[in-house]
Amino acid sequence: MSEIVRPVEELTQAEAAAELARLALTIAENDRLYHLEDAPKISDAEYDAMRLRNAAIETRFPELVRSDSPSLKVGAAPSAAFTQVVHSVPMLSLDNVFTDEDVVDFIASVRRFLAWPADREIIFTAEPKIDGLSMSLRYENRRLVTAATRGDGTTGENVTANIRTIKEIPQHLPKDAPDVVEVRGEVYMRRDDFFALNQRMAETGQVFANPRNSAAGSLRQKDPEVTRSRPLKFFAYAWGETSEPLGETQYDVVQRFGDWGFQINKLMDRCHSVEDILAHYRAIEAQRSELPYDIDGVVYKVDRLDLQARLGFRSRSPRWATAHKFAAEKATTVLTGIDIQVGRTGALTPVARLHPVTVGGVVVTNATLHNEDYIRGIGNNGQPIRDGRDIRVGDTVIVQRAGDVIPQIIDVVLEKRPADAVRYVFPDRCPACGSHAVREEGEAVRRCTGGLICPAQAVERLRHFVSRNALDIEGLGEKQIEFFFNAEDPALRVRAPADIFTLKARQEKSLTKLENIEGFGAVSVRKLFAAIDDRRQVEFSRFLFGLGIRHIGETNAKRLARHFLSFSALRAAAESAVIPQGKGDPGNAAWQEINGINGIGDVVAEGVVEFFAEDHNREAVDALLQEVTPLDEQPVGEVSSPVAGKTVVFTGSLEKMSRDEAKAMAEKLGAKVAGSVSKKTDLVVAGPGAGSKLKQATDLGIEVIDEDAWFVRVGKV
Ligand code: IVH
């Protein structure tokens, strides 16, 4: 640091904020040089001095701790420090609900799915949602063998050595435990332990923003002895693979974990009705601040495990559980500006720039303002919101942050409005390309009409293409994408996804070398090209998600991939599909096939068909397919099941299961479920009252069975 270092006590708040911003940048840059390029430019002592200075300023001004603060970054290059563990049963997340009505809906959806009689109760457990990090502990022959973090749900980090240092986690299980059992739960740190730790750490230059980060940072240490010195704790509340059933109800299994020596949460209880559940929620909420650890909601789970099994899972979360989050935390601050961001579909989104403020332990400097109506005080239904109060630059505003959701501005304090504040005028031109930005009838968003000429959209599409859940190309961040996009030299330019994969070959032929350009070193260039080459074969669903087709998020991409199994089959269907024109038009068979996939409706199907109808999209995909191979999806479900690969139609009324449940069961067994009977149908399951579909099936000579025979066929009797 060449500048004169002033004592921390003398800094004003503004000076401190500016210095923290500089330190965050400089330390991050040095981390990059050290870890990614193995080429540090400063001595360890200088580096340590910067971290210490950062910590000292943060200790004096805790409200200025930045979300990108070096003190929040955990260890060195953390993921490389641990080996990977593939979870034998995926670690899923939970759906969130926020209001009492949402809870009522959740319970109704469970009952509907199970076609549960109105006069029979379903018991739910209710327990605190612990704010820590989830952990899977695998015991074989009653000995702890592996401990893994959740990671992306499929693959986590092997932290066994570190977990062994936590006293609360048994190394051995008693005789009655099965041969294989994965006990899952939350590693957390008590609030008082967190404060004490931070005080100790302030001198060493590493402080944590909250107990959760502190628990994560303490666990992900290269040296288990460091973890040992940290007061980590564990609550058991779930399980993964087991060699034998653990019990009949959620409650009983968790009590059993307690008998085995795990800590279980005392506030877990069984509830018999919606009223009971909501009363429990309020009781836990009322104790929240007195609990020694952080919680951010209450989790409800269907108690009976046979019902959990029938309910099964959606793509990312179980149907039998949900998290009821506590109301968001709020804070007041000043809106210093409104910027417009252009997304990959051209949507113009207003972003609030805020005077930094801490909301529930996290420093917030940006918040979403949703759309132009929202700023004007008009809701999605055209009705006034905030009693019609508009939001102006200079206003004092109320910011709300709930969990991981992007913070939002929920209100303005009119009494504090400066006299010169003016109404915000939403631009009618795209700030990135100058094209008209128009709002379609009935739409809330204004979109740039620049399409292919709009650099912001193109850059966003590329960023999406390489992002973690799409092609996941490491080393291609926002800055790099912008650099390649704007490169004058054709040997460096990347305008479309395929260009990423031709970059290396173009480089080899050219005189301009990437490694000579500032910001890229020989090592990072080598790593980048390796990361790109690594993705020349990629899962079909990631490839599809990466294309950025409207309405095709990760879940829909997976649905389509699982149905069509190969990209070429999906494309052929999309290119031959005819979108229905008006009511009564059923579209053609290809349309019905796409539209008939569980979870895919008209809007999504249209997005897919329209995408492949555009010449330039087809060209971009063709160019990409020269470079990248989307791998065929393996049929899911119990592939050896007697209905795997078969197309099944359910018709008439079903008595032992709901239509949704029938569909979910068939799909889990690897069957395709169709809505109408055609030559492609293999099996029709007909209940009482079946009409035209049954007749069609008989006419076509398709096998027809009843519900009981279905259960026999799939071996569920
Ligand atoms: S049950 C199949 N119970 O919340 C789902 N999760 O948002 C199993 N969490 O990843 C999770 N307290 O880390 C469950 N009492 C609790 C929990 C809990 C905290 C975390 C867990 C999970 C996340 C999902």
Image: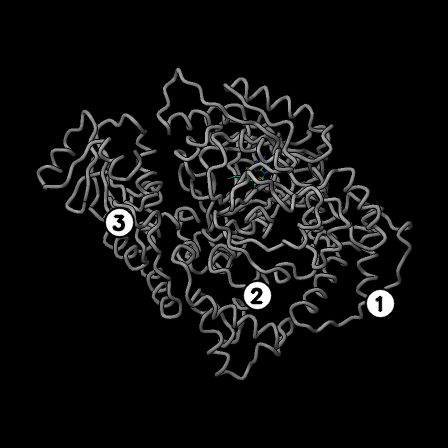
Image height check: is 418 above or below 510?
Answer: above
* Comparing labels 2 and 1, the label whose residue is closer to the camera: 2
Q: Residues within 10 Å of mark 2 (few under 14, many from 20)?
A: some
- State the quadrant of the N terminus: bottom right
Q: Secondary structure at mark 2?
A: loop
Quickly name the residue at label 1: 2
- Name the residue type under label 2: Gly
> Which residue: 81% across, 55% down?
205
Residue 354 place in picture, x, y as percent: 68, 43
| Mark 2 to mark 1 CA distance (whole Å) | 30 Å
**Dot 3 or dot 2, earlier in sequence:** 2
> Which residue: 40% across, 38% down?
441
Q: Residues within 10 Å of mark 1 (few under 14, many from 20)?
A: few
Residue 512 place in picture, x, y as percent: 55, 81
| Ligand 1 falls in quadrant | top right
Quickly name the residue at label 2: 475
- Name the residue type under label 3: Gly
Question: Are dots 3 and 2 in contact, CB under 8 Å?
Answer: no
**Dot 2 or dot 1, earlier in sequence:** 1
Quickly name the residue at label 3: 645
Image height check: is 496 above or below 546?
Answer: below
Residue 579 place in picture, x, y as percent: 25, 45
- In the picture, residue 695 is in which quadrant? top left
Q: Secondary structure at mark 3?
A: loop
Q: Secondary structure at mark 1?
A: loop
